[in-house]
């Protein structure tokens, strides 16, 4: 099998097979080469005795809808969707979960079957909640959280998730306050509680990445979350100066390999975790949406080397 497939591959050559087994699940994105989803999901499928392959598909922006329609006609069960197609995936579905409705972004599609419409789910949010609990033995609702890159696709999903879980305090950080003002307005109702002395303005804040008050804001936080793209390249600098990080901090990085932020945070004595745990848990939730039962988590962990 190829490392990844294109629309032309699927149209011209049809479905690839290996040992008589055809793909019925895929992850779609642009670019897609870096995705670890196939190794994780294939391990779960093999462990469950499900005879199907999980492949990568590289789709050009103008091809996304066509790829989805083709996969539906080829009897695919569903797909995972990654950058930059999460909004397009949500728009195609007739049945959406709460987080998809709130964010307009989906990472999991279940194709129509047994008379049911195509359904869209965002498992990034609940996967993040499970990852934080697993890595740090704490619940989101008990934390004061600083979210770096809150205006991005993943950041928006995590912001809504933190708000829906009624975290102690949430600070949204972006390069431009203009870009996160609408998000702050959407999330404000989750932080209004007549039984608390603090109002929404105290528990939900926005701050620019270059603000002179960012260090003070981070100092008072429990959890720092990096949802920026800084760290994807090994040469990327950390999104924040290492001096902002203190030993009491928990640092969760959506980047799935060790990067400058994680290395510097460890040097400062903070507890850190990379994004592999979130990838694992959001993947397990996708599996549940497709098949109706939980996958073999140990097989998935082994495939991800965690």
Image (cartoon, rainbow, N blue to C red):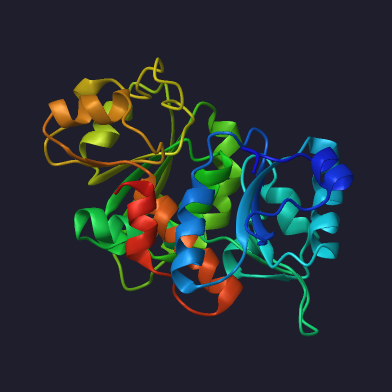
**Residue 184 visible in the picture:** no
In the visual, does 164 lie left or right of 12?
left
Quarter-wise, where is residue 12 in the image?
A: top right
**Residue 302 visible in the picture:** yes
Nearer-the-camera pick, 193 or 252: 252
In the visual, does 45 lie left or right of 26?
left
Quarter-wise, where is residue 6 in the image?
A: top right
Asked if 214 appears above or below 40 in the picture, the reply is above
Quadrant placement of the N terminus: top right
- Place of residue 306 in the rendered image (x, y in percent of width and height, measured from the top left): 29, 49
- Place of residue 102 in the rendered image (x, y in percent of width and height, measured from the top left): 62, 61
Measuring 77% from the left and 53% from the top, which residue is drawn there? 15
Measuring 22% from the left and 46% from the top, which residue is drawn there? 222
In the visual, does 304 lie left or right of 144?
right
Asked if 216 appears above or below 43 in the picture, the reply is above
Residue furthest to the bottom? 114
In the visual, does 177 lie left or right of 216?
right
Quarter-wise, where is residue 43 in the image?
A: bottom left
- Place of residue 4 in the rendered image (x, y in percent of width and height, measured from the top left): 66, 39
Nearer-the-camera pick, 85 or 8: 8
- Place of residue 247 in the rendered image (x, y in percent of width and height, measured from the top left): 11, 36
């Amino acid at each position: 099998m190829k490392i990844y497939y294109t629309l032309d591959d699927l149209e011209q050559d049809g479905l690839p097979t290996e040992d008589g087994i055809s793909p019925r699940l895929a992850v779609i994105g642009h670019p897609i080469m870096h995705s670890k989803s196939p190794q994780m999901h294939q391990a779960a499928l093999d462990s469950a005795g499900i005879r199907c392959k999980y492949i990568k598909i590289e789709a050009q922006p103008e091809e996304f809808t066509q790829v989805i329609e083709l996969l539906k006609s080829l009897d695919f069960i569903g797909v995972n969707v990654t950058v930059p197609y999460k909004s397009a995936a949500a728009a195609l579905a007739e049945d959406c979960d709460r987080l998809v409705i709130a964010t307009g972004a989906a990472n999991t599609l279940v194709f129509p079957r047994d008379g049911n419409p195509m359904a869209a789910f965002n498992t990034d949010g609940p996967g993040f909640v499970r990852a934080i609990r697993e890595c740090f033995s704490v619940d989101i609702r008990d934390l004061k959280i600083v979210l770096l890159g809150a205006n991005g696709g993943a950041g928006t999903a995590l912001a809504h998730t933190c708000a829906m879980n009624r975290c102690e305090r949430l600070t949204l950080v972006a390069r431009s306050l203009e870009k996160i003002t609408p998000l702050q307005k959407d999330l404000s109702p989750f932080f209004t509680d007549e039984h608390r002395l603090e109002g929404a303005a105290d528990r939900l804040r926005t701050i620019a990445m270059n603000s002179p008050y960012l260090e003070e804001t981070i100092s008072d936080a429990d959890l720092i979350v990096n949802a920026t793209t800084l760290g994807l390249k090994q040469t990327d600098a950390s999104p924040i100066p290492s001096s902002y990080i203190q030993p009491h901090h928990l640092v969760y990085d959506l980047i799935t390999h060790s990067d400058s932020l994680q290395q510097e945070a460890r040097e400062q004595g903070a507890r850190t975790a990379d994004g592999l745990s979130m990838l694992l848990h959001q993947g397990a939730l996708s599996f549940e949406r497709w098949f109706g039962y939980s996958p073999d988590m140990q097989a998935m962990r082994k495939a991800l080397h965690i």
